[in-house]
Image: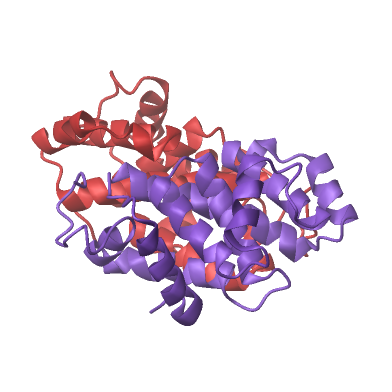
Chain colours: A red, B purple
């Protein structure tokens, strides 16, 4: 049960959904930020950006966000959940492009602290073709999930075990996005 | 110098200002979130909410954000910068209400990890009169500054030393807010 009375049935509105309904004034910018970062037209695919979100959520051990964004990434990535799990288990060996691997390393540094992003990490990403916009958005996606993860867990919300729930959410997100 | 080409003179647009200009699509929800959390009408004063932001930014060792929000808190809090510095140096002994102290303890837990917010921390805040909305917003302010701090430092932006710069920014924020 969440730390505060969210006014919803948490089994119907698990994770971030309850807090978003509880506080529509903050839900609006939170949802808009996710939509711009993860779904707006971009040189990184939606699957690649969701993978960054899933990777950071895994590092933060946020069960609800990691399960959600792993499912959202898998639904939109060539290679599906196998690639998501390989990235989370061993980034060095995972079958992703060198550019995406370098961006995921930047995301992992941000998860620890913004001050852990080094010139070397950024140069490596750039050597593999990353643009300034891709580097910017990787830093902000990673930073934003350090927020969403803390929001979801800091309020003690429910993180269901049933994988079907996250697959259903993935279908809705792929079809309708974060503003629906 | 920032890790990416922000397209601005960083001495004129230090810290988060450069990235906000570089990427207006994400600047919009980021600024709206700050405005709702820190400035909209609320049972916690703007000074108290800025103090939570400054406290978390200090724990994250984000020089630009901590200097900025310490100045914004000081400009709006009874007791000014002395109280801000006392909270940051020793929360147990700082001259703030028991409710605000309990909320700051929740914020400190969130800064470490959302999973560090315990039932006991929440109950203590409630015993001292904190409402569900105040607890919600404390968690989200703390979580949001774990994002803003990582955004600012993850891009390697400039954090000026001159206190006058932060005092000037405080005047503008108190007068015009985050959407200007």
**Pick the front one: B30 or A93:** B30
Residue located 43% across and 36% down the image: A111
Q: Is residue A41 left or right of residue A54?
A: left
Q: Is residue A146 left or right of residue B168?
A: right
Q: Is residue B133 left or right of residue B151?
A: right
Residue located 57% across and 63% down the image: B74
Residue located 70% across and 43% down the image: B91
Residue B14's image quarter? bottom left
In this figure, what is the number of numbered marks?
0
Residue B120 at x, y = what percent? 83, 40
Residue B153 at x, y = what percent? 35, 44
Residue A28 at x, y = what percent? 51, 71
**Pick the front one: A129 or B7:** B7
**Pick the front one: A102 or B160:** B160
Residue A146 visible in image: yes
Q: Is residue A158 left or right of residue B1?
A: right
Residue sitting at the far right: B127
Residue B100's image quarter? bottom right
Residue A144 visible in image: no
**Pick the front one: B168 or B42:** B168
Is residue B73 placed above or below A67 in the rendered structure? below
Is residue A62 placed above or below A14 in the rendered structure? above
Residue A114 at x, y = what percent? 38, 39
Residue located 67% across and 51% down the image: A14
Is residue B145 placed above or below B27 in the rendered structure? above
Is residue B63 placed above or below A105 in the rendered structure? below
């Amino acid at each position: 049960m969440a730390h505060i009375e969210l006014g919803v049935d948490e089994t119907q509105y698990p994770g971030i959904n309850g807090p978003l309904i509880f506080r529509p004034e903050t839900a609006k910018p939170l949802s808009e930020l996710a939509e711009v970062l993860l779904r707006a037209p971009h040189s990184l695919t939606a699957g690649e950006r969701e993978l960054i979100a899933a990777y950071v959520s895994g590092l933060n051990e946020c069960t609800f966000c990691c399960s959600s964004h792993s499912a959202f990434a898998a639904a939109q990535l060539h290679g599906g959940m196998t690639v998501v799990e390989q990235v989370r288990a061993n980034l060095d060996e995972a079958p992703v492009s060198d550019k995406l691997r370098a961006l995921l390393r930047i995301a992992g540094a941000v998860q620890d602290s913004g001050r852990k992003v080094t010139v070397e990490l950024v140069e490596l990403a750039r050597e593999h073709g990353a643009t300034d916009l891709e580097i910017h958005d990787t830093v902000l996606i990673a930073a934003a999930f350090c927020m969403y993860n803390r929001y979801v867990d800091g309020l003690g919300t429910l993180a269901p075990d049933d994988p079907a729930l996250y697959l259903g959410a993935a279908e809705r997100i792929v079809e309708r996005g974060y503003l629906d």
